Image: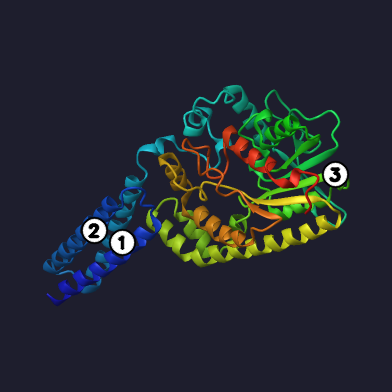
Amino acid sequence: MTNSISLTIFGLILTTALSLWVSKIVPRRKEPKLFNKIVVRIGLCTIFILFILFNLCRLVGVKIISITFITVITFLILIEFFLRFLRTQTRSVNSNLVLRKESARFDEFEVIKAIEPHKNSEYLTLGFWHEMQLFTSEGSAIKSKTQDDKIIVDAKNFKGKHISAHNGMRSTTDSPIKASGRVLLLGGSTVYCFEVPDSFTIASYMQRSLNESGDNLEVLNYGISGATVTNRIDKLLSIETLSEKDVVIFLFGDNDFGWQNFYMMQTLTLKILRRLSKYSVLLGWVYFELSAVGRKKTAVTLAEKNIEQLKKLSEKLKTSNIRHRFILQPNIYTKKNINDYESAIILRFGNEVLQMTRDAYSVYEKYLVAPFTSATNLMDGTIKSVYLDWGHVNAEGNKIISDFIVGLDILNYDQKN
């Protein structure tokens, strides 16, 4: 009887710990009371099943070591089913409209045209989507090495009906024939804007706005898929024609929370656990908890390094009287009041990206004084989501970002750095 009581207490402690663990990791969305009921009911059922199992083993004369082994294995199996059930409950009605691939541009047209941000999009045609996927499958960037061994990444030249690139840049439409200055727009794939035709990129929206206001400036799109702060600084400094007539706009954040570094520097144990987590929710959560410290350290360290690099770049640009702004990008994790579709997107991309983004952004947000500025709240007013995945947006989202940049005083020649 003593063993049975001990087992019950042991099961209660484990279930309570598990419940707290689950409540911390699994998004509760809009039904916290229902979520708590599910945790309590399944937890009590787990204790009851273990209690019955333990006593049945004793009745048939199984040795205590074997009883313990069977109980532990059963408990782990129950936890696995418990977690799978919770995940199923959480990924409810909108999960069938969420991406299958890790980035919107790699997904099938039939999936993309059905998701909330792309419903009724006039520019989203089968021809455009196939052309874009053909371009990206062949490689959208080319690398070259400078004399001091730095790797410079440029856009691969491409001429299509809907998407094109030339002179190492994504094409910007409506450019003036003869400009008095340039706006150099630097960033990652969210600046390149794969998911829309040429005329709907951030750069093209900016160009039309500047044309309408009478500013004779040419907008150049230096976005590159996967580009980091370091990568784009190297590219900017390799441009020999920079002058006082230029304006540098640097969008950063979405590729600058360290996920590439984190995966490359993981221990063998974590790498094995990460692979096994594809087959087990329990192992996935064990991996998530064990990697928490390293994940946060990587994100924070990289963010601090990037801030220092951007500060040094700012000093160089000031010395040359080149106007500039460094804009902290919005993404789905910085949006307030997310809707059901966006909640499903967050679940699709998991907690690793969410936590690392928030850890890095907590550092970046400490430095939001000129030349740094924040655009993290730009999408807060959108009711219908503009997010195609956790970072990339549709044409409406690009227009919102463009309007924000054009509204900065830095584009006015009378303004100083």
> Label 1 near label 2: C-beta < 8 Å?
yes
Q: The residue tagged with tag 1: helix, strand or loop?
A: helix
Q: Residues within 10 Å of mark 3 (few under 14, many from 20)?
A: some
- The image quarter in which residue 51 lies: bottom left
Q: Quadrant of residue 397?
A: top right
Residue ranking furthest to the bottom:
2
* Percent position of residue 183, x then y: 77, 41
Residue drawn at point x = 60 percent, y = 38 percent: 400
Q: Is residue 60 above or below residue 27?
A: below
Q: Nearer the viewer, mark 3 or mark 2?
A: 3
- Choose mark 3 or mark 1, whichever is in front: 3
Judge by depth and name the residue closer to the eye, 378 or 28.
Answer: 378
Q: Residue at the location (50% across, 39% down)?
A: 382
Q: Name the residue tied to disc 1.
A: 19
Residue 98 picture location, percent across and down:
45, 38
Mark 3 highlights which residue? 245
Q: Quadrant of residue 258?
A: bottom right
Inter-mark Cα distance, 2 to 1: 8 Å
